[in-house]
Image (cartoon, rainbow, N blue to C red):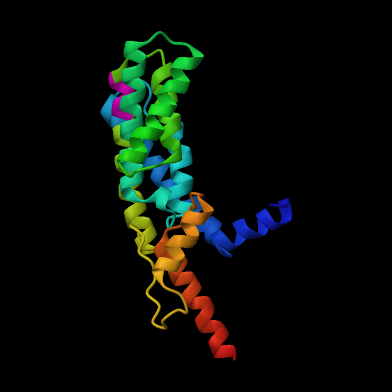
Amino acid sequence: MPYRQLARAAARATGRLGWARGATGALLGLGLAGLLGRIVNGAVTPFMVAPMGAAAVLVFVVPASPLAQPWSVIGGNIISTLIGLAVHALLPVTPWCGALAVALAIAGMSLARCLHPPGGACALLACLGTGPAGPLLGAVLANVAALVGTGWIWNNATGHAWPHHARPVAPPPSYTMDDLDAVLEDWDEMLDVSREDLDALFRSVEARVNARR
């Protein structure tokens, strides 16, 4: 996609002031994540892990994404961290060790239906880290709890239901869900939008076209 089209798509995704809503939510969520991490780990570092920055972008900027739902944030980060720690304990630290940790994290998240991109970073961090496992796991647990709690309060308070639910649209479409599923299967691509949201979007477009006619 050309850069200008990509920029316009990003602007549509966040809305006119969506960036401000997302930035404020990330500020609150990550601030609380750091405070809770400090309480859990005390003077021992880390009190915040870097993948939470990426998680905050998903949770507060694109809360409708399937990759940003509560179970994705919770399961994706925690499962991946545990996998990374296990690989670190069983194998010597090498580049292939990190690659294996991320690959296993992708498999684990997919099987648990909690695919979350920052989870790959958590697995890599846990596998290649040199510090004790306890503080890292404690920081991840604390950070995830703060992000999910803040995300639930902030997103719902600002008019973005979280967990996300597709908006119901009354007019029946000119296609069936079987048609939609068949096209998605033919594409063989993972889209960062649920089939229910695609259906609601297509119905809204059809309703608008019919009203104009």
Q: Is residue 39 left or right of residue 9?
A: left
Image: 70 above or below 83: below
Helix, strand or loop for the magenta stretch, by majority: helix
Please state the horizontal and vertical placement of residue 35, each as a whole percent of the image: 34, 36
Q: Residue furthest top?
A: 92
At a point 36% along the width and 28% down the height, the residue shown is 47
Which residue corresponds to the image point at 53% horizontal and 77% vertical from the top-left? 205
- Quadrant occupied by the C terminus: bottom right
Residue in front for this viewpoint, 208 or 155: 208
- The location of residue 10, given as percent across then percent down, is 60, 56
Q: Is residue 124 above or below residue 174?
A: above
What is the span of residues highlighted in magenta in the rendered image? 134-139
Q: Is residue 114 visible?
A: yes
**Residue 100, quarter of picture:** top left
Vertically, is 71 above or below 132?
A: below
Residue at image position (35%, 58%) is: 162
Q: Quadrant of residue 142?
A: top left
Q: How many marks?
A: 0
Is residue 81 on the magenta stretch?
no
- Find the residue positioned furthest to the bottom: 213
- Name the spot of residue 50 as percent of width and height, x first: 46, 31
Q: Position of residue 153 (x, y in %)?
A: 32, 56
Looking at the image, can residue 49 be seen? no
Residue shown at the point (68%, 52%) measured from the top left:
1
Does residue 196 appear left or right of residue 135 in this picture? Answer: right
Q: Give the quarter of the image for residue 208.
A: bottom right
- In the picture provided, is 206 more to the left or to the right than 146? right
The residue lying toward the viewer, choosing from 110 and 20, is: 110
